[in-house]
Amino acid sequence: MGSASKVILVGATSLIIGIFAVSLKTIQTNDIKTAMVDTKRVQFEQVQAAAVRSAMYYFVYYGCGNLPLTSKNALGGGTYSYKFENTTSSATDLTVTVSLDGVSRVITARVENTFGLGVNQGPRKMHRGTWQVTKYYVART
Amino acid sequence: MTVFLDLIGSWIVRASLIIVMLTLTLNMNNTLYRSNQQSYAKKILTAVDSIMYSDINEAGYNVSGVTFQTASSTDMQFLGTLNSPTGANATVRWYAVWDATTRLYTLYRYVNNENGGNPIKMGNTFSTVSFIYYDKNGNTTSTLANIVSVRVSLVSRYVLTNAFATTKGVTNDTMYVSANFRIHPVNL
């Protein structure tokens, strides 16, 4: 085999393997991106729940009244702000805006005073004092 | 004579190298094809399970009675508000229909106030569709009023057509991708 042929053979083989490696890497990157969708979803849900629990803490701490829109607070790599409106002795409307990685979600929640009765126990339910979330809605964007 | 032998040997070596190269290329292309198809299938399944997850997550919002209306292993129907916190309640149904010919499930999503009340086909490649329902104590339940969480398992089957399947006696490859998650809707 002549020298030129050897160079062409080696070059062609390297090119083929190189293209293969790059293509495989692209596919793997796509796989990781797909897997990250689920991870991000779970992370965002956790931050949303934590933001509502945190807002309820301030609600009880400041005496269970209307609370104006707060400035942004840092939480779990994101930020949140909250507002309590239409507060009575038995219920209040909570709006929480959570932002994470450039995406925002607005949570609308109804918080009711159980007066210590009929509290739904369990880690899923959001409580603070005698107040608990009875409706929880996350707006889709 | 020695020159002829050298020439023949040289041709054999060159031909062998070319055959090895071509085989390598074919194998690598096949691997790329499989990987690409698997990645594509995962992406499609993720899109479907994200919509399902999002729907189930809103179950029970603004519902005063029993949220779940149907709860079988391949059919679930529930009430919830999907589009606005002040909007009307929607009836949402996810169900799978078995196709005896393909031996696969077709998965449908129905929302009474979307798409003119017509179900949307979400895919027809599911070899497994399974919904399991749990009560507040974490036990499986079939009592509609007791359901507070749902486990969803989806397995999607794809047949990768092999170019040599008919000519060389090579069978087509089958590939599976799956999704498995459990949801605790906050309003239940």
Image (tube, coloured by chain):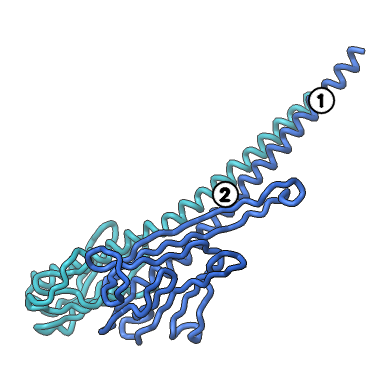
The kind of residue tagged 1 is Ile
Q: Which residue is nearer to you in this view: A92 or B22?
A: B22
Is B184 placed above or below B24 here? below
- Helix, strand, or loop for circle 1? helix
Q: For mark 2, what is the residue?
A: B35
Q: Colour of chain B?
A: blue
Q: Are marks 1 and 2 on the same chain?
A: yes
Asked if residue A89 is positioned above or below residue B157 in the image, the reply reads below
Kindly identify the amino acid type of the residue bearing the numbered disc 2: Ser
Chain holding disc 2 = B
Q: In the displayed structure, does residue B108 sit left or right of residue B139?
A: right
Front one among A6 and A73: A6
Q: Earlier in the sequence, mark 1 or mark 2?
A: 1
Q: In this structure image, what is the colour of chain A?
A: cyan
Residue B69 spot, x, y in % from top left: 35, 80
Instruction: Tell me the residue at 31%/85% (across/down).
Output: B86
Quadrant assignment, res B153? bottom left
Residue B130 in the image: x percent, y percent? 42, 65
* Residue at the farthest right position: B1
* Position of residue A68 measured from the top left corner of the image (x, y, whole percent): 17, 77
Residue neighbourhood size for the residue with mark 1, other residues' Cα within 10 Å, grouped as few (<14), some (14–19), many (≥20): few
Residue at x 55% of width, y 57% of height: B40
At x 33% / y 65%, what residue is drawn? B183
On residue B12, the disc is: 1
* Residue for point 52% across, 72% down: B97
Q: Give the quadrant of the N terminus of chain A.
A: top right
Badge 2 marks a residue whose secondary structure is helix
Q: Which mark is residue A99?
A: none
- The C terminus of chain A lies in which quarter of the figure? bottom left
